[in-house]
Image (tube, rainbow, N blue to C red):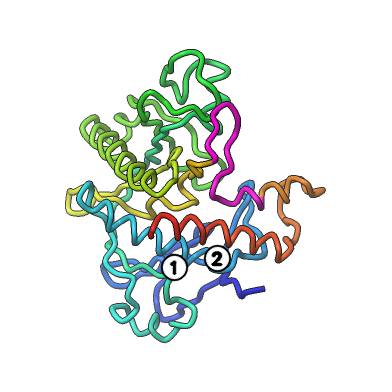
Amino acid sequence: MRHAVVSVSLPSLRHRASGKVREIFEDGPNLLLVATDRVSAFDVVLRQGVPGRGTVLTRLSEFWFGQLAEVCPNHLLTTDLARMPEAVRARADVLDGRTMLVRRVEILPVECVVRGYLAGSGFKEYRASGTVCGVRLPPGLRESDRLPEPIFTPTTKAHTGHDEPLTFAEVGERVGAETARRLRELSLSLYAAGAAHARERGILLADTKFEFGLLDGEMVLADEALTPDSSRYWDAARYAPGRGQDSYDKQILRDWLEAQPWDKRPPPPDVPAAILEKVAARYAEIAGRLMR
């Protein structure tokens, strides 16, 4: 079993926050985002990590930030440890490949979700009401069908529990009407660019979510971009609407946990190394295909 990095400590830097995956440290006016190999399922962080997962998330975010820079600027400064504080360089054995130095931005309180296909919770809602997050869709669509056009289905940014759907009007109430229009415009443009790139490599981008922030009054793409954690990717060659698709994500892990006598509350069961390695292979595969 390869070693998984599940915790990171940099005592000489101020620790700002911990997420399910990332540790955030302050570096003067900038921030250091360190992607660990931690993994969660059903809102519970597991004791074991997925080896190399943090480096895949970092490499893919860096790749997409570069690919999408003409559509929208972003907060990334560098992933080169040589341009980071000594405290980071001294831990190169752990931090290399999983650390981003980013500009500090004012994060907007909206998750900007774009759906190009009918899947997941969107399909469940459509089957019940003919809508997805309040957006009316044509009748007769099947699970995994491509939508007539991508739709913007924003949600709240929940610190605990699940994000809740927002109407476009509610987004406007939170951030202002003009900012809401800009969020929708940028989200749809970024999705279109990402989906086109993925399609050329035999991958379908079913849906994804973006985070944006303000930097000196300019809207920038922040956090991560088009990773398997924030996106639903399908193999185009195996795509068959009318059923669920095999996604490039941690579904292998969820399936194993579903088969265990676990009530989805802490503490979680220990996951076999073989399952974690299968998840790691899925992450590495999608990164390799998208970045080739």
Q: Residue at left 53%, top 63%?
A: 53
Which quadrant of the view contains residue 105?
bottom left
> Which quadrant holds the C terminus?
bottom left
- Disc 1 element: strand
Q: Which residues are magenta?
A: 238-253
Does residue 119 appear to the left or right of 106 in the view shown?
Answer: right
Q: Main secondary structure of the magenta part?
A: loop
> Which quadrant holds the N terminus?
bottom right
Residue lying farthest front?
237
Mark 1, residue position? 34
Mark 2, residue position? 37
206 is higher (above) or lower (below) than 286: above
Q: Residue at left 71%, top 64%?
A: 274
Which amino acid does the dot numbered 2 rest on? Asp
Instruction: Please name which of the two marks, 2 or 1, marks the residue nearer to the observer.
Output: 2
278 is higher (above) or lower (below) than 147: below
Does residue 206 appear to the left or right of 265 in the view shown?
Answer: left
191 is higher (above) or lower (below) than 134: below
Would residue 246 be counted in the magenta stretch? yes
Q: Report if the CB atoms under discs 2 and 1 are less than 8 Å apart.
A: no
Q: Residue at left 43%, top 46%?
A: 202
Pick the front one: 126 or 274: 274
* x and y percentages locating residue 144 in the rendered image: 52, 30
